[in-house]
Image: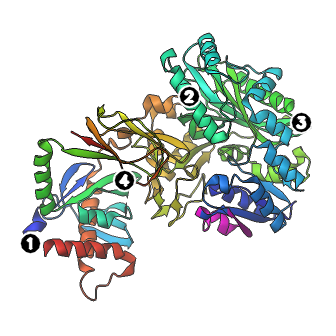
Amino acid sequence: MSVQTTDAVFIDGSEHALNGSGHAPTGTSNVLRVGPGHWHAVIGGRSVEVVMEPGAADAFADGAPTKFHVRGRELTVQIEDSRARTSRLARARVDAAGPVSVTINAPMPGRVLAIAVKVGMTVGRGDVVAVLEAMKMESSITATHSGIVSEILIEAGQAVTTRQALVRISG
Amino acid sequence: MFRSVLVANRGEIAVRIIRAIHELGAEAVAVYSDADRTARHVRLADFAVRLGPAQASLSYLDASLVIAAARDTGAEAVHPGYGFLSERGAFAQACLDAGLTFVGPSPATLDATGNKVEARRLANLAGARLVPGTVNPVATVAEAIQVAHDIGFPLLIKAAAGGGGKGMQIVETNDAFAATLASAQRIALAAFGDGSVYLERLVRRPRHIEVQIFGDGAGDVVAIGDRDCSVQRRFQKVVEEAPAPGLTDAVRARLATDAVAIGKASNYGGAGTVEFLFDPETHETYFLEVNARLQVEHPVTELVHGTDLVHAQLRFASGTPMREALEASGWRDPAIHGHPAPLHAVEARIGAEDVANGWAPSAGRIGFVREPAGPGIRVDSACEAGLEVGVHYDSLLSKVIGWGPTRAIAIARLRRALDEHVVTGIETTLPFHRWILRHEAFLSGAVSTDFVADHWKPAQSSQEQPTPEVTDAIRMVSTQARAIALQSCRPGAAYTTAISNWGQVARREALRRG
């Protein structure tokens, strides 16, 4: 199937051929599954243990990044098949035309201590839009894009969950 | 020794104290909130009592629930650990009133040392130097502005009832003062129920050095070495070691003398810590505060001095004379036995925080965990696969300590151990700790409380390109993992429930390709 030959894996952002003849390791190599999400490879005599995040399977399916733990390092790994590549390139073309609107989401569950913006305000990238409290710490949530605040989706004092949309910004 | 001791805490410290209780032949009573029903400390204990819902104020911070749990299970003593109720004089008094032994200083000592203003007065009486600042809490904003002007900038705003750096904020300029003051007071009021703050001059690039003390509550106090806890992030310690590296004998002796004098002035009973700021430029030492409890970082002292501090606490609390309790727990009085062969220990506090994303708290279920072991490694942990890390409590997951005859050996062991350490499902501070244990300034002992602000950039933890075999391994593992996912959706596939996630992948893939 032609899909197979153009699949790629991004390791910390660098692209590598996932399979096919691109970078075949030299010498003998073998890979064994030790347990769920836990693998071991011997490559040209070198031993490499790999532990994946629990969500790795879903991430692969979605073409989303996941994390591998290898030799005391945490590496971002993202598989991209040819269909995903096509849609990524399509998305890039849309993005180049400028984002219509983006939401700023909560990075972790917590409680909204303060909302720093109002609808209609102009915010710059990096400006604080809200302050969350979690694990007895205050965290400032900042705008990822510049634009005008078009919607505030939370109230002060409210509990929020991970990835819950807090504020919408129109570009 | 007691027959039964209640541990009024959770997480790694509850596990550590329950282990000591068992080692001394007593039974341990665990308490838990609904969030911790299946936590390790609950499973290791001999009795387990539910306190209430996850919210700390309705469970671990509710003194009457804890005391009722002790009474109902027949516990004779209560060990508070650190945090929660550990430094509340009123809780210690309530324990005594209920006929329970409180494993810690007397209520009067806790009241004196727990209030920073009173602690500074005591330290002053004991002859220790203080950083220029207010002796009494600042009442009004107008007064605060005047005082801030007198002390000069940069300065620190500290919660009078705070601890562990919580509610402490730096103000660089006069312009930022009013807004920062309001924030500090709000946090202090929410966290400690007391919004009063005091102000003091900020010493630039100081080291944070503390002395472990143990007192008999009647004027006899010994110092059990010092620790350097300079590596902090927003006033939270992240790396600690014993002894503090590179101090002159004169500075080390002055710190011990001051700590003992402060302990005597407060009639200190049991284990405690006196914290100091050390100015590496002038070699001045300034009293900071007394932590009237077991410290998070107590293991580095235990390893270097061969003394089990929790054993000593329990023995002393059960009536054994202080020096006898310490000696039975491994301590040797250097005044009699001389100084033993030197040892060094370095501790990494592993927290559920995303160091690449502003150290944001990271919640979730731990998937896979492998904690290190081997020569010169101690792990104090409540971390297990399946553990749900929530947002209700402090983010500390575990402490990994490397120790050995020299600082270099302790660091090499800890570095090796953290490379073996794997935690999935949540973000942890492991990448930060692996980075700092390779940082030249840390290796040379050039630490300060600004170390993280000065040197840490998240990208640094993964600057190096992965080696070719690592890249190849990831390519091959990814290929095979996906292949298994595809295979598992065929009828009669070998992989079933253990890799159910892969089944979902396969189904999605099949849909996509179909």
Cα gap from disc 4 to disc 1, whole angstroms:
36 Å
Residue drawn 63% across and 10% down? Answer: B150
Verify whether residue B43 appears in magenta.
yes
Could you say whether the residue bearing mark 4 is in a helix, strand or loop? Answer: loop
Could you say whether the residue bearing mark 3 is in a helix, strand or loop? Answer: loop
Q: Nearer the viewer, mark 3 or mark 2?
A: 2
Chain letter belonging to callout 4 = A
Could you say whether the residue bearing mark 2 is in a helix, strand or loop? Answer: helix
Cα gap from disc 2 to disc 4, whole angstroms:
30 Å
Chain letter belonging to callout 3 = B
Residue drawn 39% across and 48% down? Answer: A106
Q: Are the residues flagged by discs 2 and 4 in contact, CB closer than 8 Å? A: no
Q: Quadrant of the C terminus of chain A?
A: top left
Cα gap from disc 3 to disc 2, whole angstroms:
42 Å
Verify whether residue B97 appears in magenta.
no
Q: Are the residues flagged by discs 3 and 2 in contact, CB closer than 8 Å? A: no
Mark seen at residue A93: none
Mark seen at residue A1: 1
Q: Quadrant of residue B266?
A: top right
Mark seen at residue B220: 3
Please, what is the three-letter code of the amino acid marked with disc 2? Ala
Chain letter belonging to callout 1 = A
> How packed is label 4: few (under 14 Cα within 10 Å), some, or many (20 or more)?
few
Could you say whether the residue bearing mark 1 is in a helix, strand or loop? Answer: loop
- Is A23 left or right of B448, judged from the image as shown? left
Q: Nearer the viewer, mark 4 or mark 1?
A: 4
> How packed is label 1: few (under 14 Cα within 10 Å), some, or many (20 or more)?
few
